[in-house]
Amino acid sequence: MHPIMFLGAIKSKQRYIINYTHYSNSLEEAINKQMAIPGSAAPKWGISRNATRSEVIQHITPSNLTSNKNMLQFLEIDKLMEVSLEKLEAFLKGKGSLEGTAAAFIQAAKDFGINECYLAAHAAIETGNGQSVLGRGASFSYNHQLSRTVYNMYGIAAVDSNAVGGGKATAYSRGWFSPELAIRGGAEWISQKFVHQKQNTLYKMRWNPLSPASHQYATAVNWPEHIAARMYEICGDYHEFDKELVFEVPVYEGTN
């Protein structure tokens, strides 16, 4: 077995599979490509500044991500976790426009083949617990058409250079006029553009080891870790789930 171990995860009631996928790029090559990304798409530390090389190394290196929380970056999210409605409702309680939407996350997960815990965790991060401009709803109109309140729960098209404007325009064009419509529509978009296009883990959505520095969901180097931590809030250390969980850990060329 590859030396990356799933620390603290071996429990008698737990069922999981860890697959190791080998890539032709070396880790050094992947890091160099990240550092060469120009402009607003460059790796970021939060939203305030560009990430340093050492920060990129810290967050892209799989062997640094072996805690129970961080291992959720490698969970395959193209299938449901089958968390209970009550557990998801408890997580969303007090989170602004996300409160009371657990059923919408679960239905979207079922319809588009995506992990419901991931969807809820991602939305909580992107909307600042349902309190951001795009999360709580904002008015928008286009070409003198009727102004509508729009929602964007996953930061889709909310690029660093124009996060609110881009996010509102996309929400308007796609008809995301309620939290539930935004949850469902955004889940469909993520499913089609990432999760069912060979980027079915948080790690692959952020770092794309198959083609580094291209088609990446986010610029923040710690984006996968933030979402993984929220997923851990929902599902704990996974031991209560009877469903078999599948993890995919990348192995870069030359990694021992």
Image: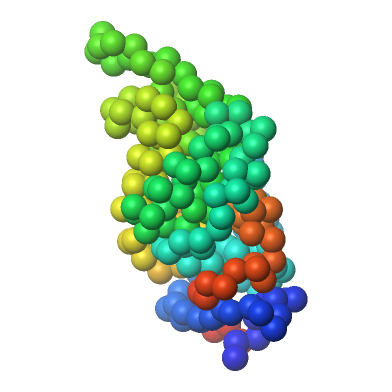
For residue 69, what is the image quadrant?
bottom right
Residue placed furthest toward the top: 144
Q: Residue at x 25, y 11 (%)?
A: 145
Tell how many labels: 0
Residue 193 placed where, x, y %? 33, 52
Q: Residue at x 58, y 34 (%)?
A: 99
Residue placed furthest toward the right: 8
Of residues 182 and 37, the one drawn nearer to the viewer in this rendering: 182
For residue 185, what is the image quadrant?
top left
Q: Residue at x 56, y 55 (%)?
A: 84
Q: Residue at x 52, y 72 (%)?
A: 243
Horizontal side of residue 69 vs 214, given as left or right: right
Q: Is residue 250 above or below residue 215?
A: below
Q: How is the rendered protein coloured?
A: rainbow
Q: Is residue 2 above or below residue 140?
A: below
Q: Is residue 42 visible?
A: no
Residue 9 placed where, x, y %? 70, 76
Of residues 241 and 53, the one drawn nearer to the viewer in this rendering: 241
Of residues 81 and 224, the one drawn nearer to the viewer in this rendering: 81
Q: Is residue 227 visible?
A: yes
For residue 1, what is the image quadrant?
bottom right
Q: Is residue 251 above or below residue 151?
A: below
Residue 14 placed where, x, y %? 64, 78
* Quadrant of the frame with the C terminus: bottom right
Residue 11 placed where, x, y %? 71, 80
